Image (cartoon, rainbow, N blue to C red):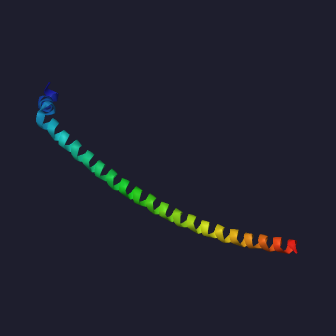
Amino acid sequence: MANFSRLNELTVAANSKGLFNGMLVYFDRENGKEIDFENVMTYKILKLLNEVQKHDRIQLLELKKMFVGIYRQVSRKIALIETIMSL
């Protein structure tokens, strides 16, 4: 065991509660960072989706406006054709 003179010290250190508690604190800290990052990313993703949805709604309203205009033009032409045919 001359080559492994520190083996007993490492065994005691690995089995000590201080090391275990220290590792728990470390893992809790790392998990906290990940959770904070996920909350920030979730917020940013929701904000982006809201902006995309708003943009899509505006485009949809513009399309509806265009369709109403086309419908009016077609209705006028049909009415004109019906008037001409009834003469």
User: Residue 85: horizontal and vertical position, in percent?
Assistant: 87, 71
Q: Residue at x 53, y 67 (%)?
A: 58
Vertical relation: 64 (above or below) 45: below
Q: In percent of the image, x 61 and y 66: which residue is there?
A: 64
**Left or right side of 22 for 58:** right
Who is closer to the viewer here, 81 or 51? 81
Of residues 22 and 63, the one nearer the viewer is: 63
Comparing 76 with 34, the one in front is 76
From the viewer's perspective, tell me whether residue 87 is left or right of residue 64.
Answer: right
User: Residue 35: x, y in percent?
Assistant: 29, 48
Location of the C terminus (image quadrant):
bottom right
Quadrant location of residue 28? top left
Query: Going by the picture, which residue comes out furthest to the front?
Result: 87
The one nearer the camera, 44 or 79, is: 79
From the viewer's perspective, tell me whether residue 12 is left or right of residue 57: left
Q: Quadrant of the N terminus?
A: top left
Give the mark count: 0
Residue located at (38% from left, 58% from top): 44
How far across and down, in percent of the image, does residue 36 sit? Answer: 29, 52
Which residue lies at the image location 85% right of the left edge and 75% below the top edge?
84
